[in-house]
Image (cartoon, helix red, strand yellow):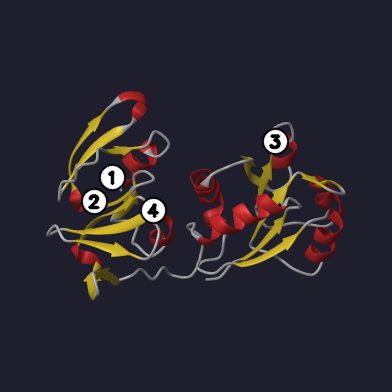
Amino acid sequence: MAWQILVVEDEEWAWNSLRDMLATSLLAENPNLVRLDTIRDAVEWLRKNKPDLIFMDIHLADGISLEVFKQVPVSAPVIFTTAYDDYALDAFQNQGYAYLLKPFDAEDLERAIAKVRKLLPSDEPRYKNRFLVKYGIHLKSLPVSDIAYFMAEDKILFVIEKSGGRYIMEDTLMGIAAKLDPTFFFQVNRKFMVHIDAIVSMVKISRGRVKIKLLPENDTDVIVSQERSILFQEWLGR
């Protein structure tokens, strides 16, 4: 389902960054983005439209965006984005579900979206059964059931078969996340998305992280990041 997302942001670099991250995040495919950059425009638009989700900067050219909530009812969850941390309390009293300090990265965005996902409209998920991969000039239709894990390396995404085959994919880790059944696949860090059956051993290491061993083996240590360790352990216990 394509969600309608209102972005109230007057900084061009911040809008471009958020737009690019949303394009490859765990959101529904092809979200309908509407960008406005003033309180006045936001109020006028919200009087006529009901977005599914709002991203809102605090400081805008014509004032503090919290003024929007005094002028028009807002029922959609709001993720506030700002360079200032002194408006957090006011934000959470005005439909705020997350508060992202600029500059934020894709993992910060993913955590914020996770807080509001249950509030957003959804269709029954339809996950991929196979991926088209390439090796040299050849193409191959690879069943998801044959995949052990995905690995990002030097801006290239590889998919590793359970049998050891390795192929290039024209995608990103965040891009494929919405296409995979989360019952079986989990993104453990910025480089690896693993199938639960590919994990052969796990060891807790410093700062709450977890080191995992995969089959087929690879030359890179696979460490579940500190930020994702709790989610990873919850995933293992589903």
- Quarter assignment of residue 228: top left
The amino acid beneath tag 2 is: Ile
- For label 4, the residue is 155
The amino acid beneath tag 1 is: Leu
> At numbered mark 3, what does the secondary structure look like: helix, strand or loop?
helix
- Callout 2–callout 1 Cβ contact below 8 Å: yes
Q: What is the number of the mark on residue 88?
A: 3
> Is 108 displayed left or right of 231 in the figure?
right
- Looking at the image, is 39 positioned above or below residue 102? below
- In this rendering, the label closer to the viewer, 2 or 1: 2
Marked residue nearer the N-terminal end (4 or 2): 4
- Between residue 172 and residue 108, name the one nearer to us: 172
- For label 2, the residue is 196
- Quarter assignment of residue 101: top right
> Is 19 displayed left or right of 228 in the figure?
right
Marked residue nearer the N-terminal end (1 or 3): 3
- In this rendering, the label closer to the viewer, 4 or 3: 4
> At numbered mark 1, what does the secondary structure look like: helix, strand or loop?
helix
The residue positioned 19% from the left and 52% from the top of the image is 197
Marked residue nearer the N-terminal end (2 or 1): 2
Cα gap from disc 1 to disc 4, whole angstroms: 28 Å
Residue 11 in percent (x, y) is at 73, 50
- In this rendering, the label closer to the viewer, 1 or 4: 4
Disc 4: CA contacts within 10 A as few (<14), some (14-19) or many (>=20): few
> At numbered mark 4, what does the secondary structure look like: helix, strand or loop?
loop
